Image (cartoon, grey):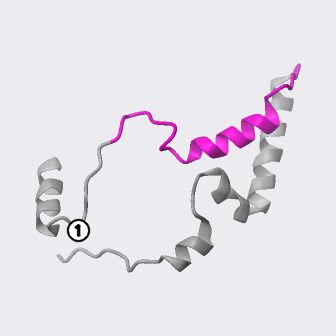
Amino acid sequence: MARLIGELLADLDCHVVLVYTPSYDPDANRIEGLWRVVRRAVTHNHHREDFAVLMQDVQAECDMLHQNPAAVPQHTWSPGPAALDAHSHPPLAVAA
């Protein structure tokens, strides 16, 4: 598989750049920002006697995010739909 990817990149002639990242890099992993928001709302400076109550609070916070999807990009270090529309690029296609 790695050989096929290498050949594909060579055929694309610098139109695609392969970037190697560490196996764990929370600064590059966008979901970490979302988890940070949930943790702040649910576990920071909060104490619960029961795990079920903790899970209910996590679910409630996730439900709030689900009800306001436009707020999610700001927590995931993403530019958001408006910025993506303004700078949209045609999709890449690979000929068979």
- Residue 91 left/right relative to 94: right
Q: Quadrant of residue 8?
A: bottom left
- Residue 14 within the magenta-colored segment of the rendering: no
The structure residue drawn at horizontal position 18% and vertical position 64%, both measured from the top left corner, is 14
Q: Which quadrant of the structure image shows residue 7?
A: bottom left
Circle 1: residue type = His
Q: What segment is highlighted magenta in the picture?
A: 21-49
Q: Is residue 24 above or below residue 82?
A: above
Residue 80 appears left or right of 89: right
> Quick one: 32 or 50, which is closer to the camera?
32
Question: In which quadrant of the rendered view does residue 46 lie?
Answer: top right
| Placement of 58 over or under 96, stated as above or below | above
In the foreground, 90 or 52: 90
In this view, the residue in front, 70 or 1, is 70
| Helix, strand or loop status at disc 1 | loop
Determine if the magenta segment contains residue 41. Answer: yes
On screen, 50 above or below 36? above
Q: Count the labels in the image.
A: 1
Q: Quadrant of the C terminus?
A: bottom left
Q: Residue at x 54, y 48 (%)?
A: 30
Q: Is residue 42 left or right of residue 83?
A: right
Q: Which residue is mark 1?
A: 15
Please provide percent x and percent y for residue 55.
79, 34
Q: Residue at x 50, y 44 (%)?
A: 29
- The residue sitting at 73% across, 35% down in the picture is 39
Residue 67 location, x and y as percent?
A: 79, 61
